[in-house]
Amino acid sequence: MKPLSSWLVYVRLRRQDGARIFAIELYISIAIALFLVVAWLWLGMPNTFAKDGLVDGLGALSTVLAGFFVAGLVAIATFFRENSSLDDVIEHGPAILNYSTDNEEYFTRRQYVCSIFGFLVGLSFFLAISAIFLRSFSEPVSQLLHEKETEIYGISIPWHTCVEFLTVYVWITVFTWQIILTLRGIYYLMDRIYDVRPSLGKPKNLPATKNEGGPNVRIP
């Protein structure tokens, strides 16, 4: 199953204090998505899943972005392989895989950026494919739930409205996360990747490293 889950490496990365690297950007995505979906609900949720609607349009955008992310992944994976500073371990605010285990690994700049773009490719595929399914099944599901209602604080709300709201909220959260992570990846490519000393954040004490004919590796 490793080939099918390799794009999820990014969500497994932790900082030296054990915090998930993706946590802050996901919290921001949840907050932004909630604001956007509430505004969309206030407007009557016009043309949410239909052709040329909200999900359909953003799904098409994700399809286009997938090509950009694949190109970025290929570029960073093959860029200056020999004696490149891209293969230096991140010294300040390290990205750690398998945190607090015997297989703990400190990522290099190249590994970190590749994990970002690999995850973005996976998100793009998920958003594009799910948009097709949502457009195809939204109408039958809406008709199936149309006669059923639930009460929230004394207000009767059709089930299909609740399902539509929750579905759009989750989908927009993932899309917003994709955009925020894209901006983070672009920032790292434009600024941090050229820093003399690899850095993601606040300086931390790292184990000694050595060069063994390629990427710097942690000395046990």
Image (cartoon, helix red, strand yellow):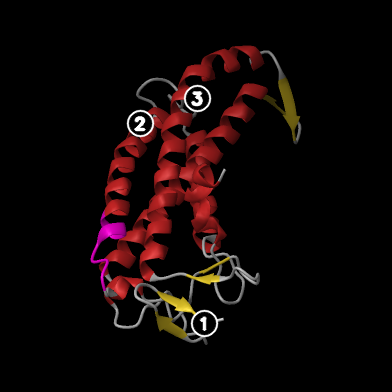
Marks 2 and 1, the one that precedes in the sequence: 2
Describe residue 106's horizontal placement relative to residue 185 as left or right: right
In what element is the residue under mark 1? loop
3D distance between C-alphas at marks 2 and 1? 49 Å
In the rendered image, residue 106, in percent from the top left (x then y), is placed at 50, 72
Q: Quadrant of residue 79?
A: bottom left
Q: Which residue is label 1 attached to?
A: 219
Marks 3 and 2, the one that precedes in the sequence: 2
Q: Which residue is label 2 attached to?
A: 57
The image quadrant where one finds the N terminus is top right
In what element is the residue under mark 2? helix
Q: Which residue lies furthest to the front in this view?
A: 213
Q: Which residue is label 3 attached to?
A: 134
Magenta range: 75-82
| Amino acid at dot 1 | Ile
In what element is the residue under mark 3? helix
What's the residue at 40%, 41% (across, down)?
124
What's the residue at 34%, 75% (across, down)?
213
User: Label 2 neighbourhood size at 10 Å, few (<14), some (14-19), many (20+)?
Assistant: some
The image quadrant where one finds the C terminus is bottom right
| Amino acid at dot 3 | Leu
In the rendered image, residue 210, in percent from the top left (x then y), is placed at 42, 83
